[in-house]
Image (cartoon, rainbow, N blue to C red):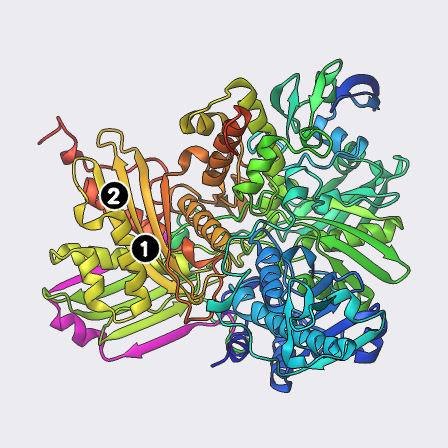
Amino acid sequence: MPMSTIELRLNGERRTIDVDPARPLLGVLRDVLGLTGTKYGCGEAQCGACTVLVDGTPMRSCVLPASAVAGKTVKTIEGIAEKDRLHPLQEAFLACDAMQCGYCTSGMIVSGVALLERTPNPTPDAIVRFMDGNVCRCGTYPRIVAAIQQAALAMRGGAK
Amino acid sequence: MSARDDALTRAEIEPERYELFAGPSYRFEIPRRDFLKTVGAGLVVVLLLRDDEALALQESGRRGGGRGGSLPPDVAAWLHVGADGTITVHTGKAEVGQDIRTSLSQAVADEIRAPIESIRMVMGDTALVPYDMGTFGSRTTPSMSSYLRSVAAAAREAMIDLAAARLEADRAGLVAENGRVADAKTNRSLGYGEITRGEKIVKTIEDAPDATAPENWTIAGKPARKVNGRAIVTGAEPFVADVKRDGLLVGKILRPPVAGAALVSADTSGVAAMPGVTVVRDGDFVGVAAPDEPLAEKAILTIRAEWKTESGADSRGLFEWLKKNADDSRGRGGFGGSSRREEGSVEKGLAEADLRFENAYTVATIAHVPLEPRAAVAEWEGEKLTVWTGTQRPFGVRSELSSAFSIPDESVRVILPATGSGYGGKHTGEAAIEAARLARAAKKPVRVAWTRAEEFAFAYFRPAALIEVKCGVKKDGTITAWEYVNWNSGSSAIETPYDVANASVRFQPTKNPVRQGSYRALAATANHFARETQMNEMARAIGADPYDFRMKNTRDARLTGVLAAAAERFGWTSRKDGDGRGSGLACGFDKGGYVATCAEVEVDKSSGRLRVVRAVTAFECGAIVNPAHLESQVEGGVIMGLGGALFEAVEFESGRILNASLSGYRVPRFSDVPRLETVLVERKDIPSAGAGETPIVAIAPAIGDAVFAAAGVRLRSMPLAPRGVEIPKAEKPGEGG
């Protein structure tokens, strides 16, 4: 298989990897780079479990070839907290019990972080529209919406 | 009847868990003293099954999939209090997202009088936990919770005994609290870890002290955060495919066009030229193991194979097919066999009726679609096999593995990492067997993680249902006759809770059109859909309010309790039907849980587009252990129920799955969720039942009746309106005729 050397900035660190450039980023993250927080759910960008931020934009890593992140900044669920300090959205997921089995949670949080960066004060409708590509089969949707609203409030300096 | 007796009598596998008809297995006993040698210093409390319980488990094990293994067979549950005060609890139940890791921790913390943070649950590791048939049937809360409370209460009493000796104090003056035993008189206290002083103290109990009554719970009964939540929100919680082993290979399986096809020939010569790739052909199994995923995928694509398939059923015309394919051969001691109840004379009842009805209801085949498809990592060490996999039946999967490889149960250890849920869909060990077969050939650990397409096409489905109802009602609301036949889907909640003097209720098994198995609430969803829809139709036909009609026809206070609670929160009496808006309700019970749902819908009369605006669900399952997680389970059940109610359906042709992808099979998303309200009705006087299943059953018939109220169309098939409601032409505005 043809291999390429790809440089990227991953969760704040410069990384150089030799991979098949056509290989989906998801497998590269999980099997080459050992970051297993990003999950496989459908392989066709329909469920959002594999969401990562590429230069701040949420992308489905299961259909994104590794070559697409050359020279880019990639952030995965492992890079959302700052060391031991959880992101306000992670805190809100805990406070709102916004998870059941937890398999969709990484993708939900990464998508939610992207939303909050764009829209610091999203309405419930805006949350539903932005998050509609992320599936939670356990049906925790109302709590996830509540968690995003709570995080938005906390990030604007409101009461937690 | 005590909770333990209840657990015993209901330890039977329900009749429609088709996937559980595993062959007989073996039973190997490990003496209790050998098992205790493996446990470190501290206090060990072992709760033994009573002889009758052990016998019942053994018998069900013989039918349902075997037992025996690393632990003595007569252990119900056990815990260990270590020198650092950590309380480690061992249970065979599996956490698959229903939050029992948290609720069982709460029960133990409550009973042993220690902070929840000091509790560590060891779950679903067949080498470390007592045998358990599986986590299904909403049995964890009523049975395991009471076992663990017993063990924890005994441990607490033992701690007080030991502390009295250590402190040379009067036992009566000692109080256990917050992980310590304190003497109020002298103000001295000892932590649980200190009390054992590095000795190993073993207590075996058979009859435990009385568990704390729900009104005196201090930790249980209140919301508690998910105990492993932090690991989940940081991506650190390992799920199956995240398990790391040295030299781990990636496995791929050659799939036939249709599940169950026979392999005629396979040319694997292309793989031979690929270095580092192992290929296995064994019967109908063909698979490869390679150092990485791209290579494994490439290798599997080089294999040329010919399959022999039998002609199978189609989803189009399925219900006629079911009627032509009645099959009573599944009997086997009553499991999966037909059932029938007759009372009075339906013929006479129909003759007495003012209005008679004869209808057929259908429910499509649907898929579980757990977001984590099946996966397993397998590793051999000589003849010993360790498998990490996500399943609701770790001991069942162990039996599948031991019988697939003709090795004893004790040679197999099944470990459950976090599981990306199951909903009844992960009772079996397909990926475990595949990974183990490849690992044995490759002599290295192998991971097999199914794709979404594989999960759709090679797992099992919730059975489709055809339900035929004949009934009659008098104008005063008396139901005079009820004839009910369920074809194929099963007998869960098949009985009507309403008064009727003349009834005939029957479950008729058929040949399986596709591979069928358990699903959240099993056939209770189909049976509630048909029964509650028919109730609503009868009520409206005699001009009665569907609410009043039910209240007249049942005396079950728990049922009327949830119905009244849902109707009150919803504002049933002030609802406004008509002009494209309508409200409906339905209720029922199963597995110790009572549910009622009121739904409001909007139907666009020109396009037929159906939108569920609002749903209120009242649920009661006895004493509440964790209100936050209970509400989450109810809400999740209702949302999952929305999928089956509105649009989910597996399409197949001659057994081949046509929509085996998330783009082809629609599941509920954020935008499908209506305004949801949950009313938790608590009955502290009733032992807690499970809540993972029953909340799903009432949403479909409630929506169906709301559509009738809104548009005058009676829907009798699930999904109700995948392409919108078909409005009769004459009713379309501007097309009057």
Which label is found at residue B483?
none
Q: Chain of mark 1?
A: B
B123 relative to B148, above or below: above
Nearer to me, B21 or B219: B219
To which quarter of the image does residue B106 belong? bottom right
The percent position of residue B250, horizontal first and vertical second, equals 79, 41
Which amino acid is tagged 2? Val
Depicted B454 relative to depicted B386: above or below: above
* Element carrying mark 2: helix
Residue B349 in the magenta stretch? The answer is yes
Q: Magenta residues, as a range?
A: B335-362
The answer to whether residue B532 of the structure is visible from this angle is: yes
Across and down, in percent, residue B90 comes to: 70, 65
Q: CA distance from mark 1 to mark 2?
A: 16 Å
In the rendered structure, the answer to whether residue B215 lies left or right of residue B405 reads: left
Q: Residue furthest front?
A: B186
Local crowd size for mark 1, using a 10 Å CA cut-off: few (<14), some (14–19), many (≥20): many
Which dot marks residue B361?
A: 1
Whether residue B715 is visible here, answered yes or no, is no
The image shows residue B303 at horizontal and vertical percentages of 77, 39
Kind of residue indicated by mark 1: Tyr
Q: Earlier in the sequence, mark 1 or mark 2?
A: 1
Q: Residues within 10 Å of mark 2 (few under 14, many from 20)?
A: many
User: Is residue B84 or residue B345 the one in the foreground?
Assistant: B84
Q: Which mark is residue B707?
A: 2
Task: Examine the structure image and report whether residue A150 is included in the region drawn in magenta.
Answer: no
Residue B485 horizontal side relative to residue B139, left or right: left
Q: Is residue B489 left or right of residue B269?
A: left
